[in-house]
Amino acid sequence: MADAPVDITTLRRVLLVPEAGGFCAFEGWVRQTNDGRAVAGIDYSAFVPLARTEGQAIVQEAKQRFAICHATAMHRTGYLSVGETAVWIGVAAAHRDAAFSACRYIIDEIKQRVPIWKKEHYATGVTEWVPCHTR
Amino acid sequence: MADAPVDITTLRRVLLVPEAGGFCAFEGWVRQTNDGRAVAGIDYSAFVPLARTEGQAIVQEAKQRFAICHATAMHRTGYLSVGETAVWIGVAAAHRDAAFSACRYIIDEIKQRVPIWKKEHYATGVTEWVPCHTR
Amino acid sequence: MLNIDLQYFAQLQDAAGRAHEIRTTSAPTAAALYDELRDVYSFALEPACMRVAINAAFSPWEQPLRDGDHVVFIPPVTGG
Amino acid sequence: MLNIDLQYFAQLQDAAGRAHEIRTTSAPTAAALYDELRDVYSFALEPACMRVAINAAFSPWEQPLRDGDHVVFIPPVTGG
């Protein structure tokens, strides 16, 4: 959980172990439209202590389920403009199958379980809590 | 096709379009062991003109098959040491499903169709053409 | 009576008009406490679509509350 | 007779002991040319596990060769 931008190059470097041949990363970016409405930015709030332990639990689960070497996840809080990176996940594995599967597992679980909420700020000035994930 | 290291930050930045909410990247790194043998490095050779057109064809196919905004692929040639990035693929899409699927499609097709060959240099000093992909 | 340390997030924070309060209650469980708060703040969210965290850990709605517990009702999450 | 511009990669380059040659041949197709070269260089790879590129485009093995064509036999690829 980070309340300011994190350098992705640094996050990636930690995963660069010599046993790893495949690396998969996922990033969630603030998108300029959602459900056809123009978005100016998104305010992310989190119940930080639980978000942190739940995020760590998800990464541990990924390590148990898939043959991976290393995995990290980072999630921003606070107000992010269009184009900013809200979430970053990186997974290093011997082979690409495990890297892709674990990376997908981690982002899917984060979206389902980690106590983070987004309030979209529309270009019109209106703000709204995003009700739930539709995909 | 690149005969020297490429700055990943620059490759990624090109994909950062405001319509994109999800970004998936895959990197292939030179691994320190293969089939139980200690690897010092890998020499990548390519039939460059065909590798380039075939790579571009794969990216175009990915754009047609999946709802993505943008995709790029980079492959190194020449001698790479353990830990160096041999291949980089980045895909930006409105949603993560398409980003993951297209990224996976591109790396799978590259490994099957693009005329690039690797000669592994083992710690013992022996070198050997990798016979074919086992996974 | 129990003193419960409540923290509110997202829609619940807007409806309650606050992020935090210490509340004295006779509610024996988180489920009962949420029912009590719905009367006070008109929370629109159904408990069926939420989870509850007691002392920063996901917990059963029927877990007995103890004095001094920290309780957070977790609206549907939308991170990522 | 045709003059064919040949380029060799990977195992074929090692077996031929060269990366490039211009060869005068009566082989009417890439398939026939590969058979001719197997006699010369003892290539171990079966054509069934390879593809052929004529003028930098994947082409059928039975495509008629023309004078000046650039031909590359493509061993099983292992990039990525």
Image (spheres, coloured by chain):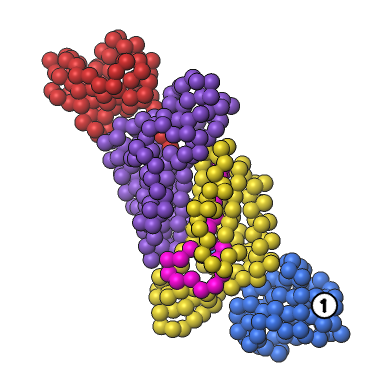
Chain colours: A yellow, B purple, C blue, D red
Asked if residue A126 lies left or right of residue D22, the reply is: right
Q: Is residue A53 above or below residue C4?
A: above
**Residue at position x 60%, y 64% from top?**
A1
Please state if C72 lies on the left or on the right of B84 as rendered.
right
Locate the C terminus of chain D by quadrant: top left
Q: Point out residue B64 in the picture as x, y percentages from the top left corner.
A: 34, 52
Pointer 1 residue? C68
Of residues B59 and B81, the one drawn nearer to the viewer in this rendering:
B81
Q: Which residue ends up furthest to the top in the rendered image? A: D39
Q: Quadrant of residue D79?
A: top left
Q: Is residue B54 above or below residue A105?
A: above
Q: Is residue A110 visible?
A: yes
| Left or right side of A44 for B8 | left
Task: Report x, y in % for residue B32.
Answer: 55, 32
The residue shown at (38%, 66%) is B18
Q: Position of residue D11 (x, y in %)?
A: 38, 20
In the rendered image of this protein, does residue D49 appear above or below residue D80? above
Identify the secondary structure beneath mark 1: loop
| Chain letter of disc 1 in the image | C
User: Which image quadrant for residue A34?
Assistant: bottom left
Identify the residue at image location x=46%, y=83%. Answer: A126
Residue range of the region highlighted in magenta in the rendering: A75-98
Amino acid type for the residue under numbered disc 1: Gly
Q: Residues within 10 Å of mark 1 (few under 14, many from 20)?
A: some
Tell me if I can see residue A94 in this picture.
no
- Splitting the image into 4 quarters, where does residue A47 fall? bottom right
Residue pictured at 46% horizontal, 74% vertical: A41
Q: Is residue B4 left or right of residue A135?
A: left
**Image location (x, y in percent) of residue A73:** 58, 56
Q: Is residue A76 magenta?
A: yes
